[in-house]
Amino acid sequence: MLVRRPQETFSLSADYRHRSGLAGGVTVTTASDRFIDAANTRRLDGYTTLDLRASYEFYQGLELYGRFDNVLDAQYETVDQYGTFGRAGFIGLRAAL
């Protein structure tokens, strides 16, 4: 097995867009345990994250959007001793010209 690579990963996304301009989506990502050394003796635990997103096109070409990552605040590392974000939210305005 390769160092820092999970043997199994899974990601499932679902999105919906309504003709009113409202859209939303969800993504679930899971990764199995991984080894952190070439001898495959030290492990990092696997993890599961849940991400949500939504947007609203309020005027032709202008869209307000938001994203909420790691909703369940999973504590995980993809590399030993390298921190990852906990729960995080983002909001913005998108313009299509």
Image (cartoon, rainbow, N blue to C red):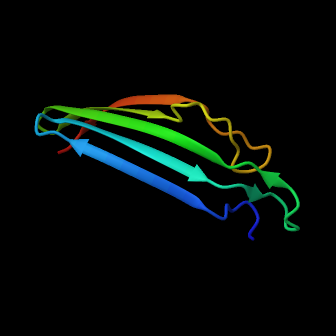
The residue drawn where x is 69% and y is 62% is: 5
The answer to whether residue 59 is left or right of residue 24 is: left
Residue at the extreme bottom: 1
When the figure is inspected, residue 6 is found, relative to residue 77, above or below; the finding is below
Quarter where residue 1 is shown: bottom right
- Observer-nearest of 79 and 97: 79
Number of marks in the rendered image = 0
The answer to whether residue 63 is left or right of residue 29 is: left
Residue 40 picture location, percent across and down: 84, 65
Q: Quadrant of the C terminus?
A: top left
- Observer-nearest of 28 and 54: 28
Quarter where residue 22 is shown: top left
Residue 20 picture location, percent across and down: 11, 34
When the figure is inspected, residue 12 is found, relative to residue 91, above or below; the finding is below
- Observer-nearest of 97 and 5: 5
When the figure is inspected, residue 45 is found, relative to residue 93, above or below; the finding is below
The residue drawn where x is 39% and y is 50% is: 13
Residue 6 picture location, percent across and down: 67, 60
Residue 68 picture location, percent across and down: 45, 32
